[in-house]
Image (cartoon, helix red, strand yellow):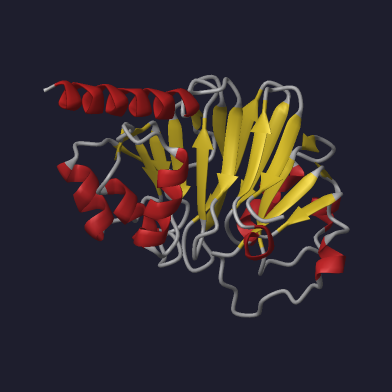
Amino acid sequence: MQQRLWWFTGLIGIIGVLAWHQRPDGNLHVILLPTAGDAILIQSPGGSFTLIDGGRDPIGLAVELGKYLPFWQRRLAAVVLTRIDDQRVPGQLGALRRYQPTLALAPADVGGEWRAVLHDLAVPIRHLQPGQQLDLGGTRLRVLAVHEGEEGGAVLALEYRAIRVLIHTGGSSGDAALATLAGQPIDLLIYPWQRPIDNPLLDQLRVQAVAFSTGFQAAEPALHTLYERRQLAPQVYHPKLDGAIRLISDGRAIKITTQLP
């Protein structure tokens, strides 16, 4: 009996230590996950989580989410689907079978299994459209541009106090949104690897760091060298070179860490 009590006490202690290490730290975390396709995880300063897209590998995404979400966490503040394709939907579907969001944002023409799963979970779905704003626990997510169709995608701005992260997931329709940000500081730009970088509107942004995503597939991919891409910003990252790319911010300054040295 006493041995069981010791065993139970030890188990409670281990759980307590894990919970302590996974508590919110009061910072914003933006993580570009190294999955096949595109998947971005946002942890608000208050500790809530939002998933943008999901990649094409449900198992791989589940492994990555398990590294960052507390083991008891089974809810998401929101899920956002920026484009309906096999680079985003399969992973997010897998996540929806494990985590229940409070809200979902997606293109107007999304349907099929993704919509059916959310319907079963009684999760409200809002059509992704410019001008939308979400309060993610002190962090604001704004939808700047949406393009549906073959070159679909969206441009999203994540803002926390003085810090701004720009997430560009699609085609040329997002360029008009870039023009509205000309001259403004962008602490991190998440931008498709296959999109061209010789865009004057990009040059007008004051970008401090760029993390390239891999989910956008272009018929004629932009063949810029890594050296050329380094002209965009002082710091340049890619998941295949760096693993998970993580921005951490207290709202005044940022720190970017990578999984691989």
Residue at the (66%, 43%) spot, across then down: 166
Which residue is at the front of the view, 191 or 211?
211
Q: Quadrant of residue 188?
A: top right
Residue 178: x percent and y percent? 72, 46
User: Measured from the top left, where is residue 41 in percent x and y?
Assistant: 50, 43
Q: Residue at x 19, y 36 (%)?
A: 122
* Residue 226 lies in quadrant: bottom right
* 157 is higher (above) or lower (below) than 25: below
User: Considering depth in this image, is 115 or 77 the residue closer to the camera?
Assistant: 77
* Residue 41 visible in the snapshot: yes
**Residue 2 on image: x %, y %:** 16, 21
Residue 3 versus residue 167: which sits nearer the camera?
3
The answer to whether 9 appears left or right of 152 in the picture is left
* Farthest residue, direction front: 2
In the displayed image of the protein, which residue is found farthest to the left?
1
Check the image and report above or below for 79 versus 47. Answer: below
Q: Residue at x 45, y 51 (%)?
A: 64
| Residue in view at x 81 percent, y 44 percent | 207
